[in-house]
Amino acid sequence: MPADILDKEIKFLPGVGPKRADLLDKELGIRTFGDLLYYFPYKHVDRTRFYKISQITGDLPYIQLEGIIKRVGIAGAGRNKRLTAIIADGTGTLELVWFRGLRWTGDLVKPGKKFLVYGKPTLFNNKVNLVHPEMEDPETQIKTISSALQAFYNTSEKMKNSFVTSRVISKLQNKLLTLVAGKIDETLPGWLTGKLRMEGINEALLNIHFPQSIENLKKAEYRLKFEELFYLQLNILRQKSGRNEKVKGFVFTRVGELLNTFYHYHLPFELTEAQKRVIREIRKDTGTGKQMNRLLQGDVGSGKTLVAIMSMLIAVDNGFQACLMAPTEILAAQHFRTISEILRELPVKVGLLTGSTRKKERTVLHGELISGELNILVGTHALIEESVQFRQLGLAIIDEQHRFGVAQRARMWKKSEHPPHILVMTATPIPRTLAMTVYGDLEVSVIDELPPGRRPVVTAHYYDNRRERLFGFLRKQIELGRQIYIVYPLISGSEKMDYKDLEDGYESITRAFPPPGYIVSIVHGQMKHENKETGMQQFISGRAHILVATTVIEVGVDVPNASVMVIESAERFGLSQLHQLRGRVGRGADQSYCILMTSHKLSNEARQRIKTMTDTNDGFEIAEADMKLRGPGDMEGTMQSGFPFALKIAHLGKDSQILEYARQQAISILDNDPMLEKPGNVILYRQLRKLNPEIEDWSRIG
Ligand code: ADP
Ligand code: MG
């Protein structure tokens, strides 16, 4: 059978037709036989167990029973009109109710007929009934592929209204599998499935939809998850090795004058061991002639900026320019200040370019970049605009990468005749499995140590009614000479309301902390850039005691004297945001505090988040908890991970072991056959091209 049976349009499957085909396409993106087969159930329910009507109570989950219809009737009127049927099995009777599809159901459900009934019991007026149960003729069940475990498929509201239920999808799968079973082309080489003792694709697809036992199902799941994760890794790793072969990097040979002088005379503090190690890794990478693509992970406050500065000095020492890109203007401006300050006695020229840089300054910057006069450019994404051209950009650093996508990273490549070395820095603690997938094409360095003398931030949860106590505590901290952040949420969609919260908050804070004894400044995204800068500057210089802000200060901001972070409506923030915000304090030697203010009404998930925050300061633990709470989907989304294909069955959080195993297999295959040219790997090559048609030429950069 030709490979393309799975490419056949879904409307040609008996029982589908143009209307249902349209629905399946619009609602689930199912267009072909293959799409349907790879539309996997989200759960399976044991259908070997039959309940007796006398055993059924209102609090049971889905149940199935067999019985004979006694009476059928219509009750109610208008929106309440419903079809009811009484079914009996010798131990009692039970009411079945339908509000929709009355005519269609009425034609099917007739007194005297025998049915397998499947549904979730509900209590209504103290009586148990089944609303919209699935009805099946015991005779027809014997004729189709049967299974002990019934698969359940997600369907949309629209589909339900057109009676394309989970049950219908299951029937379609049944028809499809009867047609194609045993004829589907294998998607993994036999030597690999053999070696790993996995079943073939035909068996796996049959067993995922119609398993005969739990064991059966587990085997099918494993095979399909493995396959998915394996190709994901093979794709990433293949791109990476293709790049290493093809792309020549600038060689930073010189052990530089600037770096030496800086290290011996201007280093503001002893480097931590972790910082030293990472700098060694970067020097090694940039000295070899290959192009560096490195991810630097380090928890908030671990001192990534210093590593960035020293790496840029290496580039400048070797006659190249370097740039540092930050996600916000506030952070870019801060980096510019820090770097200018720390390098003020060295012959290095540093510039700042953001969206609010005036045209005149911008023209000057552009000129200095082209002439090579400017050594280091700091900025926001304004840096990657077409008009910004360097004389010779040797190193591009991207701070807080989780805000940037792969596409932006790629644009950095075009700034030079050769692609510059790339260092991506992030404090977003990414669980290992996710890093392996999202950043699978990068080398990873980790700063796993905080500068000495840091005391862990003490985190407390206050309900709103303890505000007076909070203010008392804040006054004491101010007396001790400390500074305080108070952050309000800003969730798009209700921004107007949020700004009102912020303004009301600011007012009540100024009432509780009135001038001239106290100075409160404010910073938020709606302000003009100059005003933002003034607000920040007041706080950085130590004049303002309190900074009221939105999450514009979430990442990167570094004011070591600030020792208290108050987060208002903390229940509205995600875990990684809370962790980032907390990271704004605890940067000096003083004991720091993070106070999470919430209302009394907390969802279970919000309660979990708050508890995680008060339980641990460890970024990795928080990331794992985060992934368990909301799944990796969001994270993948925000990082625009550049997944060439969506995961249909594997789960990065739960299937980390399979992922790791799949990665090992992919590595060892590519080690032996980098171009996948060997006859035994033909399937791999073909399948990869099919899954990721975007890679026309594998040597091109992803
Ligand atoms: P992040 O990794 O979150 O970007 P920063 O680079 O902003 O962290 O550093 C956090 C704070 O720690 C800064 O105030 C910085 O000056 C300080 N710092 C960095 N490295 C060291 C070190 N080796 N010893 C002491 N303090 C350090
Ligand atoms: Mg930083």
Image (cartoon, rainbow, N blue to C red):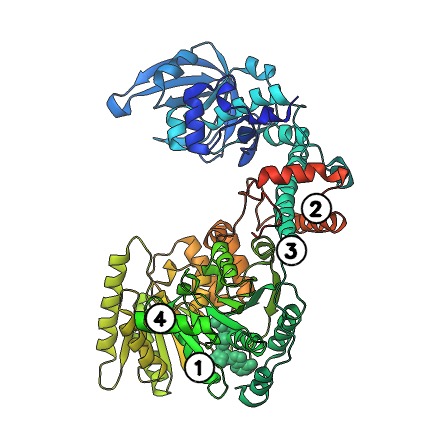
Residue 336, by quadrant, is bottom left
Q: What residue type is labelled 4?
A: Arg
Q: Where is residue 631 in the image (x, y as percent from the top left)?
A: 51, 50
Q: Which of marks 3 and 4 is nearer the N terminus?
A: 3
Q: Which residue is drawn at 44% across and 75% down?
A: 335
Kind of residue indicated by mark 3: Lys
Question: Which numbered marker is on residue 675?
Answer: 2
N-terminal label among 3 and 1: 3
Give whichever of discs 1 and 2 has the lower sequence position.
1
> Residue drawn 56% across and 85% down?
262
Left or right placement of residue 172 versus residue 503 in this view: right
Question: Which quadrant of the structure image shows residue 282?
Answer: bottom right
Q: Is mark 4 on a helix, strand or loop?
A: helix
Q: Name the residue under label 3.
A: 246
Residue 313, numbered circle: none
Q: Are marks 3 and 2 in contact (CB under 8 Å)?
A: no
Q: Does the residue labelled 1 lie within 8 Å of ligand 1?
A: no
What residue is shown at x 59% (from left), y 64% (from top)? Answer: 294
Report the residue at 45% width, 28% height from top. 24
Q: Do the residues labelled 1 and 2 touch (CB within 8 Å)?
A: no
CA gap, disc 4 to disc 2? 46 Å
Quadrant holding the N terminus: top right
Q: Badge 4 local density, few (<14 within 10 Å), some, or many (20+)?
A: some
Q: What residue type is labelled 2?
A: Met
Q: Who is closer to the viewer here, 86 or 373?
A: 373
Q: In this view, does 435 lie to the left or right of 492?
A: right
Give residue 340's mark. Answer: 1
- Res. 159 visible in picture: yes
Q: Earlier in the sequence, mark 4 or mark 1?
A: 1
